[in-house]
Image (cartoon, grey):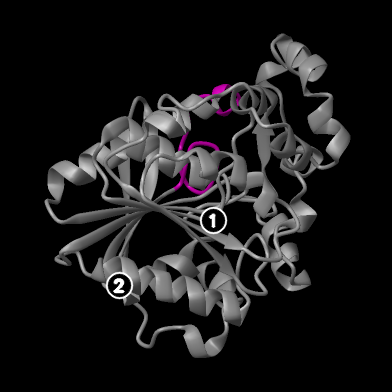
Amino acid sequence: MHERYLAELPAGLVPDPLPRNRSRYWSWRGTEVHTEYVGDPDSPRRAILLHGAGGHAAALWPYAVLAAAAGFHVVVPDLPGYGRTVVPSPGRVRYPDWVELACALTERERREHDGELLLIGASMGGMLAYEAASRTGASDRVLATCLLDPREPVAREHIGKRAWQGRAAGPMLRVLAGPLANARVPIRWLANMSAIGNRPSLTALVTGDRRGGGSRVPLGFLRSFLTSSPAVEPEDAAGFELVLAQPALDRWTPTEVSLPFFERLAVEKELVLLPEAGHFPVEEAGVRVFAGLLAAQRGA
């Protein structure tokens, strides 16, 4: 599966040779978290790469490769419900589990590494990276492709498969609090997976991936995300820098979805558009800019 996702990158941007990739399991609160470690473990710089809905470590392999080529040792977990992570009760996975795991992983990597620590968040993972950075104070920078705050009406309109689903979130949340909370349904029923990429081959790859965009998600997970709010409001954030690397042609979560949260941030910040790129950025112009941002982080 790694090779299939990597094949979506422009061939000229794929490093040769590819970096070393090791796979391990990490026991956390009864969950066996599958984690990949990419690149040189002795690098003075480390990055944690966090996926969003429909993602997993293998799907993020192209970005892990780019980060490793920029000099980072990259840690990529499969968040509960996705990839090869083993969860005792899949129907009971909730968004706070993701947040707490991301924080625990960030703190663990900080204990084991006294050099620079970058958190990279793709899609929903962008807000997850912000949460881990702001809650733990353990990272130096955040590089996010999206800052999806579900409290914002514009964000809710884009979260669901159709805009009316977001606008009807209030009554829907009351239903999802009941016996249906642990029911798992195909993620494509709830999310606009057809907009995951602007290239048909990529969209087909993601939506057909049973460990990713072709998997099932508990209805209670959706509810817990839609009712979530960050522990540290953006006006109170401190101790790290943030770059929003927004895909310029994102059909799922366009720039206006991330701007309300981004504009409130008190930390040093920068907005960079990835030209010609979709939500899952694989287009050459956008990938070149993203790779440049990774190189700039390396030299920061």
Neighbor class of circle 2 (other Cα within 10 Å; few <14, some 14-19, many 20+) is few
Asked whether 223 or 139 is in front, the reply is: 139
Q: Report the span colored magenta.
A: 78-92
Question: Which residue position is annotated with label 1?
Answer: 145
Q: Which quadrant of the figure contains the C terminus?
A: bottom left
Neighbor class of circle 1 (other Cα within 10 Å; few <14, some 14-19, many 20+) is many
Question: Is residue 85 one of those drawn in magenta?
Answer: yes
Question: Looking at the image, do the residues carrying marks 2 and 1 touch, with CB atoms under 8 Å apart?
Answer: no
Secondary structure under the numbered disc 2 in the rendered image? loop
Above or below residue 37? Residue 91 is: above
Q: Which residue is drawn at 54% across and 25% down?
A: 94
Question: Which residue position is annotated with label 2?
Answer: 20
Give the overall secondary structure of the magenta segment. loop
Asked whether 262 or 21 is in front, the reply is: 262
Above or below residue 23? Residue 98 is: above
Residue 297 seen in the figure? yes
Residue 88 seen in the figure? no
Q: In which quarter of the image is residue 283?
A: bottom right
Q: Position of residue 247 (x, y in %)?
A: 62, 63
Q: Which residue is drawn at 83% across and 32% down?
A: 165
Above or below residue 275? Residue 265 is: above
